[in-house]
Amino acid sequence: TALIGIIPSKTKAANEMYNHIYKLRLRAVTRTRDYFLSKISDLRRPKTNVRIIQVNALLKYDYLIDFLAEASPDIYTEIRDVYVESMSKTLHALFRTYHHQLSR
């Protein structure tokens, strides 16, 4: 097609595919967001092994975080902020319990 002077990205087929790819990307962002938010909410449960969730559920899919950072920076920021808040509360509770046990 380049030989006859038509730019492939300007064709009707390319426009149709662009719409399909855009919808697919939105769906992937939504599903990825839901997955990470559900795993982060698991961190907030009492007596949860945080390390297991971090390794088996979060670090295992670190490439999805990279995808979110590129595809939807707002969702990436939301996930990061929720994770930081959850870990802050979790670690605060663990250290408070540890301190209380040392004080006995």
Image: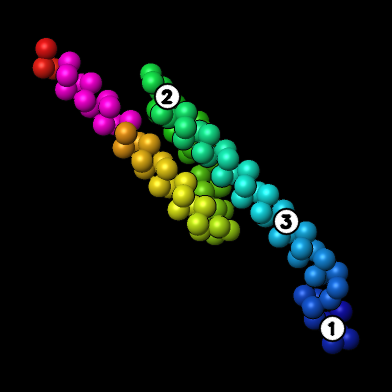
Rendered view: 52 above or below 60: above
- Residue at 72%, 56% (x, y): give it: 23
Q: Residue at x 26, y 31 (%)?
A: 92
Disc assigned to residue 23: 3
Name the residue located 23 percent from the left edge and 21 percent from the top edge.
97
Labelled disc at residue 87:
none
| Mark 1 vs mark 2: in front | 2
Kindly report the distance in space between the C-alpha atoms of the residues bearing marks 2 and 3.
34 Å
Residue nearer the viewer, 99 or 2: 99
Front position in the image: 69 or 7: 69
Relative image position of residue 63 (x, y in whole percent): 54, 48
Residue 74 position, x and y percent, is 50, 57
Q: Are marks 1 and 3 in contact (CB under 8 Å)?
A: no
Disc nearer the start of the sequence (2/3): 3
Which is more N-terminal, label 2 or label 1?
A: 1
Residue type at tag 1? Ile
Other-residue count near label 1 (Cα within 10 Å), few / some / many at <14 / 14–19 / ≥20:
few
Specify start and end residues of the magenta stretch as a single range: 90-101
Amino acid type for the residue under numbered disc 3: Lys
Residue 81, position in %: x, y?
Answer: 40, 47
Q: Main secondary structure of the magenta part?
A: helix
Q: In the rendered image, which residue does mark 2 sit on?
A: 45
From this viewpoint, is residue 44 visible? yes
Magenta region includes residue 17: no
